[in-house]
Amino acid sequence: MLDISDLEVHYDGIHALRGVSLNVGTGEVVALIGPNGAGKSTLINAVSGLVPAASGAIRVGNDDLTRFKPWTVSAKGVLQVPEGRQVFSEMTVLENLQLGATALHGRPRDAGVEDVFELFPILEERSSQLAGSLSGGQQQMLAIGRALMGSPKLLLLDEPSLGLAPVVISQVFAALKKLKEQGMTILLIEQNATLALELSNRAYILDQGRIVLSGDSADLAADEGVVAHYLGVDAEE
Amino acid sequence: MLLQQLLNGLVVGGVYALFAVGFNLIFGVQRFLNLAHGAVFMTGAFVAYYTVEAGGPLVLGFLAAVVSAGLLSVLIEIVCFRRLRKSGDAEFGAILSSMGASLVIMTVWQWISQTQVVRFPFDTVPVVIFRFWGLRVSLLQVIMIVAAVVIVMIMAWFIYRTSFGRQVRAVTDNEKAAMLVGVNPNRTYNMTYFISGALAGAAGVLVGLAFNNINYMMGEPYLLFGFAIIILGGLGSIPGALLASLIFGMVQTLSIAYLPSGLTTAFIFSAMFLILLVKPTGLMGREEAGSLRGRR
Ligand SMILES: Nc1ncnc2c1ncn2[C@@H]1O[C@H](COP(=O)(O)OP(=O)(O)O)[C@@H](O)[C@H]1O
Ligand SMILES: [Mg+2]
């Protein structure tokens, strides 16, 4: 489904990704774990066309996304739930979801507003409220729902647990588990290694722009020492 | 008589609304003050005039004015603003570059019109006066108010009720998130500038007809009023611009009728400062200026 090879990304003077290779098979949930500043967001922003790749390839199906614009990436069904939710705060919950369907660009629709409301009933209650008035957890649910409206073939999630209370995190992850059971292909970025390893089939650990470790999530979880070494305290949470 | 003056004020306010709503739309979407907006308005008036002069019907002149003013506005975005926007913090740069565009457009029309004031031929709009409840309303006034109301309603419907309008508001709200859901911001910017310019062009034709005076400088006072209106209404707020336009139209007409001449402008701006003292963000503005508010 997603096949990244030797990806290099530079910001002004910062070498954020140094030859990253990573792949996600259809129906797989793959976690990308790493400390703050490792380059995790940079990686999915490169996939989404938000930051340019200096070299390397990002293949999805027959397309190389490295030269794609963000809106053409989403038209291909590669949809990102960005870090910090980024909902349209001045618009209603319903309008946010309707906007999510823009990404279809003529592709067949897998999920509608009703399906999102079934996954996150609170959004139906709040459907006419402005998204900016929702709590952080509800905004995260809305951001995920918005992406689902675009019938993702590949869902990129950037730290969905960030800044949320433990109860809310487990609600969000319960929903992600349902998506996994429905066969959704997911690349999940997390700093919370325990959560990410629990949900995913495989995982990569990214540190300072390089993949330093990869393998089956169960194996990595069993080998807590290794994960803790790269993540510091986060692994013990 | 007061009621008659209020009616006249409403007509003037409607034309101000056409001008100011488009001006504020661009501010709402990009936080740029488009100082070429007055030149776009003036272009509309000239295009309609030359169409009618060449023998075309007024309706054709009006359509040509609306379309060419809309396209000119799109061109201004591409030439003056697009590169600046990519460079980040560009509000000040936008003021200078649109001022430059304004000068260029004015010079072109000065050259075409040879610095002459031009007037629509007599009877372009037949002089018909309707009388009811002791009021006098001319056909031209009816056309002005109907055109203003219809055009503003179409624009509001477009922005608040269509999926394309939703995309415009999404880009305003969060450009990055909008791109991630598949919106191409350049397309929405083109559309926004077209609408803004088309509104200004329509206002230009109506003002050209009402005062029967079209010249290459006619946009400048409207730019000043447009400024005052969007500050009074609230930067970026479309309902605010509408409300402030009507207030401005009324106050202006009333002060012309009841105050010594020459005091009008001073009075209008004093009234504006008074309101801003009480509500510094404008009538419908907010702390964080410049976002297009969604409907609830
Ligand atoms: N827009 C940007 N401009 C310059 N440097 C950036 C930008 N975004 C991220 N960086 C830098 O790139 C590195 C990787 O950042 P990021 O991908 O956000 O890490 P993560 O998501 O893993 O926390 C960091 O050193 C960060 O400071
Ligand atoms: Mg990040």
Image: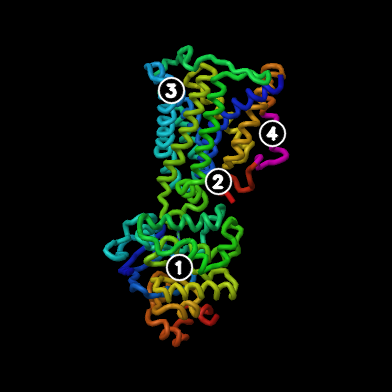
Name the disc covering residue B273, or none.
4
Q: How far is the residue under mark 3 from the one under mark 1?
A: 54 Å
* Amino acid type for the residue under numbered disc 3: Ala
From the viewer's perspective, is the residue at label 4 or at label 1 nearer? 1
Examine the structure image and report whether residue B75 is included in the region drawn in magenta.
no
Identity of the residue furthest to the top in this view: B122
Picture quadrant where residue A127 is located: bottom right
In primary-sequence order, the first of circles 2 and 4 is 4
Chain at tag 2: B
Q: How far is the residue under mark 3 from the one under mark 4?
A: 36 Å
- Residue named by callout 1: A157
Q: How far is the residue under mark 2 from the one under mark 4?
A: 24 Å
Q: Start and end of the magenta stretch?
A: B269-283
In primary-sequence order, the first of circles 3 and 2 is 3
Residue A49: x %, y % from top left: 38, 58
* Amino acid type for the residue under numbered disc 1: Leu
B98 is higher (above) or lower (below) than B186: above
Query: As drawn, is B233 to the left or to the right of B163?
Result: right
Secondary structure beneath disc 2?
A: loop
Q: Residues within 10 Å of mark 3 (few under 14, many from 20)?
A: many
Please determine if labels 4 and 1 lie on a single subunit.
Answer: no
* Amino acid type for the residue under numbered disc 2: Leu
A52 is higher (above) or lower (below) than B56: below
From the viewer's perspective, is the residue at label 3 or at label 2 nearer? 3
Query: Do the CB atoms of the residues marked 1 and 2 lie less than 8 Å apart?
Result: no
Q: How far is the residue under mark 1 from the one under mark 2?
A: 28 Å
Picture quadrant where residue A204 is located: bottom left
From the viewer's perspective, is the residue at label 3 or at label 4 nearer? 3
Name the disc covering residue B292, or none.
2
